[in-house]
Image (tube, rainbow, N blue to C red):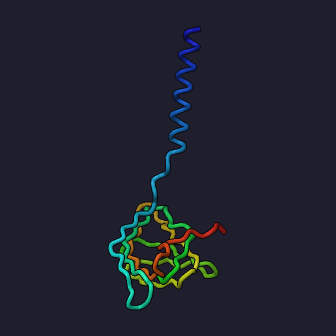
Amino acid sequence: MRKKLVLSLVLVVLLGVVAIQAQAPAPSAIKRNVMVKANMGAIGPMDGYVVEAEIAPGGQFGRHYHPGHEYVYVLSGEVTLEIDGKPPVILKPGTAFHIEPSVIHNGRNNSATQPFKAVFFYVIEEDKPMVIPAPAK
C-alpha cells in the first residue's frame, strides 16, 4: 500500500512538471531593439522609428503589417520576404527595400545556422502600434 502511494505521488509530480513545461512560452525567434523613436510633428502627427531586428535561424516574423511606411536595410544573413499577392523574394546583405502601409507580409529565415539581421526604419501615424499581426492565410 505504501509503495503504491509513493509511486502515485511520484507520477503526480512528474505529470505536474511536464504540464508546467508545456505551458511555458517558447523562446522568441525575434529580437527587436528600438534604437530611436521620435515624433515627426513637422510633417504631421507621425512617429519615426529606427529598429535593429534579428530573426533566429529557422524563425520568422509572422504575417503582419504596419500602419505606415517600412524601410529595411539587410545587415547579415538572408530572409525570404513574402508579400501577399507577390512571389517570394530572397533578400541578402546590402539589400534595401520599402513596404507600403497596410501591406501584409512576412520575413522568414530559412537558414539552419545563420541569424538574419537588419535595420528597420518606420514612419507611422502617431499613437498607432508599430506592428499589427495579420490573420493566417
Residue at point 56%, 31% (across, down):
15
Query: 89 or 43, which lies in front?
Result: 43
Instruction: Look at the picture and state if 10 lies above or below 124.
Output: above
Q: Is residue 11 above or below residue 99?
A: above
Q: Is residue 73 visible?
A: no
In the displayed structure, does residue 1 sit left or right of residue 108? right
Residue 110 percent location from the top left of the image: 50, 66
Quadrant in which the N terminus is drawn:
top right
Q: Residue at x 56, y 68 (%)?
A: 133
Report the side of 9 relative to 73 (left or right).
right
Residue under the point 46% across and 84% down: 97
* Residue situated furthest top in the rendering: 1
- Counting from the top left corner in percent of width and height, residue 45 is at 44, 85
Task: Spot the residue most to the bottom.
Answer: 43
* In the depicted structure, whether residue 5 falls above or below residue 20: above
* Residue 12 seen anywhere in this rendered image of the structure: yes
- Quadrant placement of the C terminus: bottom right
Which residue is painted at 42% across and 77% down in the image?
92
Q: Position of residue 107 (x, y in %)?
A: 51, 71
